[in-house]
Amino acid sequence: MRAAPLCIFVLYGLSSLVMLLLSSASSRRAKRLLIPLIVNLALSVLLTLAYWRVPELLSSVNPMGPGREELFTALVLAIIFGATIEIPGFLLNSQYDKRTVEALDALEIALLEARTNPSTGIQRLSQACSSNSALLDEAGIQSFASAASDSFKRMNNVDSSLAVALALQIQSKRDKVESRSKHPTPLLVEVLGLTCVAFILGEILAVMREAPTLR
């Protein structure tokens, strides 16, 4: 049994465990990735145990031939990462950000109604704050929007300067949500991309060394 593939499997499993622990202690958006991360960790553990118990298994399914087990191991793990974390995580984050933008849009519409028709708009603004409190809190605007809504209620009118400040905050938070990366682990994606380039360059150099010298 070659030690390098086993080390790659173990390191990947440890990385999966770290990602799972970090995600469980992060924001609501990150916690939505717990199931994909658990599936990824389970697969990494199964592959590590399978290679440790039956090391010939990797060689029997490796189409790259002898001496390429490390590269094949990395490709297998990259496929697992994409199938269990990257694709589901991208879809989950996109869905969550879409709902957040919709909550911000609803808040903006309610604010516009409050400015044009305070008698009904102030109540609608309060409802927009309470009905989407979790999403707005994650976006970092819930406390400000609730405070503004409570202030409007007490005055039974809309303070123009406070309404403008809230509108600017809504626009700023919407731009931030729409522009942030939908990848579950954007830094890891960049690292994996650079690693793949390094592997490809290494394979090209290996082929060039093994090729007979042209005369």
Image: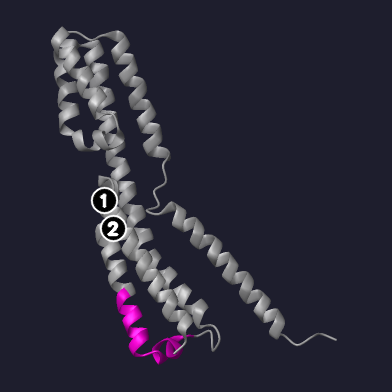
Q: Residue 162 occupies which quadrant of the picture? A: top left
Query: Number of callouts in the render?
Result: 2
Percent across and percent down for residue 101 are: 31, 36
Percent across and percent down for residue 133 are: 19, 33
Q: Which residue is mark 1?
A: 25
Label the magenta part by its dominant secondary structure. Answer: helix
Whether residue 32 is visible = no
Considering depth in this image, is 93 or 144 the residue closer to the camera?
Answer: 144
Label 1 crowd (10 A; few <14 / some 14-19 / many >=20): few
Q: Residue 179 occupies which quadrant of the picture? A: top left
Q: Determine if the magenta segment contains residue 46.
A: yes
Q: Residue furthest right?
A: 215
Q: Residue at x 81, y 85 (%)?
A: 214
The reply, left or right, for residue 170 in relation to residue 123 is: right
Q: Secondary structure at mark 2?
A: helix
Percent across and percent down for residue 189 are: 46, 57
**Which residue range is magenta in the image?**
45-62
Q: Which three-letter amino acid code belongs to the residue tagged 2? A: Leu
Q: Which residue is mark 2?
A: 21
Q: Residue at x 37, y 26 (%)?
A: 171
Quadrant the N terminus occupies? bottom left
Considering depth in this image, is 21 or 122 the residue closer to the camera?
Answer: 21
Determine the CA span between mark 1 and mark 2. Answer: 7 Å
Q: Residue 86 occupies which quadrant of the picture? A: bottom left
Percent across and percent down for residue 12 are: 39, 69
- Contact, mark 1 vs mark 2 (Cβ under 8 Å): yes
Q: Secondary structure at mark 1?
A: loop
